[in-house]
Amino acid sequence: MLKPENLRFLGMLGVDAGMFAIVDPISTDHVAYVAEHNPGDLPAHDFEYATVAPTPMGDGVFEVFAVLSDEGDYVGAYIDFTKQYQDADVDDMPLPRTEVEA
């Protein structure tokens, strides 16, 4: 279960197509091409370095968080479609560790 103290606010995700994409920046042109020419293929398309999925709520603006372990390591990402963490205190959240400690 996610705990608010293990979340670090990263930014906002604006959705105007009822879908979102997690994309390696090198794949943005490929995703944009499919979106323009075959938008119905987006969720099922085999992108090598991208994932496209529908949002459960359709369009909107959603908060995106890094998920940190109790030790402060970056272990994942979370998009808050339900706005259950909208009141999380994001100002004092620790930055994820960038180096592995010996």
Image (spheres, helix red, strand yellow):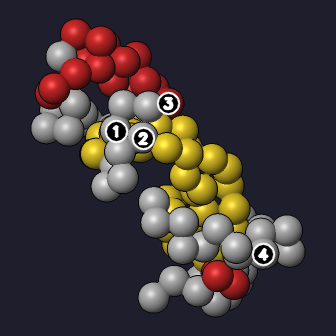
Report, in whole angstroms, how far the alpha carbon at label 3 lies from the one at label 2. Answer: 23 Å
Q: Which residue is mark 3?
A: 25
| Residue 49 numbered tag | none
Q: Which residue is mark 2?
A: 59
Secondary structure of the residue carrying numbered label 1: loop
Report, in whole angstroms, how far the alpha carbon at label 4 lies from the one at label 3. Answer: 30 Å
Q: Residues within 10 Å of mark 1 (few under 14, many from 20)?
A: some
Secondary structure of the residue carrying numbered label 3: helix
Earlier along the polypeptide chain: callout 2 or callout 4?
Answer: 2
Report, in whole angstroms, how far the alpha carbon at label 1 lies from the one at label 3. Answer: 21 Å
For badge 2, the amino acid type reads Asp
Q: Which residue is mark 4?
A: 89
Earlier along the polypeptide chain: callout 1 or callout 3?
Answer: 1
Earlier along the polypeptide chain: callout 1 or callout 2?
Answer: 1
Instruction: Answer whether residue 75 is visible to the viewer in this image.
Output: yes
Q: Are marks 1 and 3 in contact (CB under 8 Å)?
A: no
Q: Residues within 10 Å of mark 2 (few under 14, many from 20)?
A: some
Q: Are marks 1 and 2 in contact (CB under 8 Å)?
A: yes
For badge 1, the amino acid type reads Gly
Q: Nearer the viewer, mark 1 or mark 3?
A: 1
| Residue drawn 44% across the image and 31% down it | 16
Q: Nearer the viewer, mark 3 or mark 2?
A: 2
| Residue 18 numbered tag | 1
For badge 3, the amino acid type reads Pro
x, y percent for residue 41: 15, 27
Q: Quadrant of the N terminus?
A: bottom left
| Residue drawn 86% across the image and 74% down it | 92
Q: Are marks 3 and 2 in contact (CB under 8 Å)?
A: no
| Residue drawn 58% across the image and 86% down it | 3
